Amino acid sequence: MAVGVVVLALPALVLGGSRLNRRGPRSLRTPGGTTSEFVVVLVGRVLGLLLILVLSTLVLVATIGALVKDLHDLPSLVYVAFVLDLLLAALVVLTSGAPRRTRTRRRGTPARR
């Protein structure tokens, strides 16, 4: 479980955080969108990243603690947190991983003038 968090959740956290910092707030705005829509999207992304951070920390502490104490069974809530963490990380990777396509300019009409 710790490997799953390190392989998927932590890179998703870095990717999501860099998207908020690198491209700035203009990349989150849609053409014709209002300020309230922008705030809702921004707050949702920040809360999602914070939830990934909390869940990743919980899973890592529980699994490393179980290894140190030589426990064979983890509480079932740790498994639920692990699955939720992986689902949220996959959501972040799939929605913010690819760069936006730039619009190509339309050609002029081919008709002669």
Image (cartoon, rainbow, N blue to C red):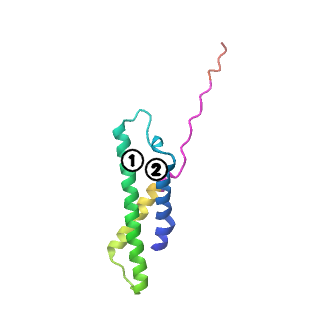
Amino acid type indicated by mark 2: Leu
Displayed quadrant of residue 53:
bottom left
Please tell me how crowded label 1 is: few (under 14), some (14-19), or many (20+) other residues with Cα within 10 Å: some
Question: Which residue is tagged 2?
Answer: 20
Q: Secondary structure at mark 1?
A: helix
Is residue 78 rendered to the left or right of residue 105?
Answer: left
* Residue 4, numbered label: none
For the point 36% across and 50% down, the residue is: 44
* Residue at point 35%, 69% (across, down): 80
> Does 59 sit above or below residue 99?
below
Q: Position of residue 5 (x, y in %)?
A: 46, 68
Query: In the picture, residue 56 is in which quadrant?
Result: bottom left
Q: Nearer the viewer, residue 38 or 109?
A: 38
Q: Main secondary structure of the magenta part?
A: loop
Q: Quadrant of the N terminus?
A: bottom left
Count the marks: how many?
2
Residue at position x 43%, y 78% from top?
64
Picture coordinates of residue 92 (x, y %)? 45, 55
Callout 2 secondary element: helix
Marks 2 & 1, CB-CB < 8 Å contact: yes
Decide: is 56 above or below 94. Answer: below
Residue at the extreme right of the image, as rendered: 112
The image position of residue 102, as x and y in percent, is: 56, 38
Q: Which residue in the protein does label 1 denote?
A: 42
Residue 84 to residue 28: above or below: below
Residue 100 left/right relative to 37: right
Cα separation between marks 2 and 1: 8 Å
Over which residues does the magenta segment extend?
Answer: 93-107
Q: Amino acid at mark 1?
A: Leu
**Which is more toward the observer, 83 or 11?**
11
x, y percentage for residue 7?
Answer: 51, 67
Is residue 54 one of those drawn in magenta? no
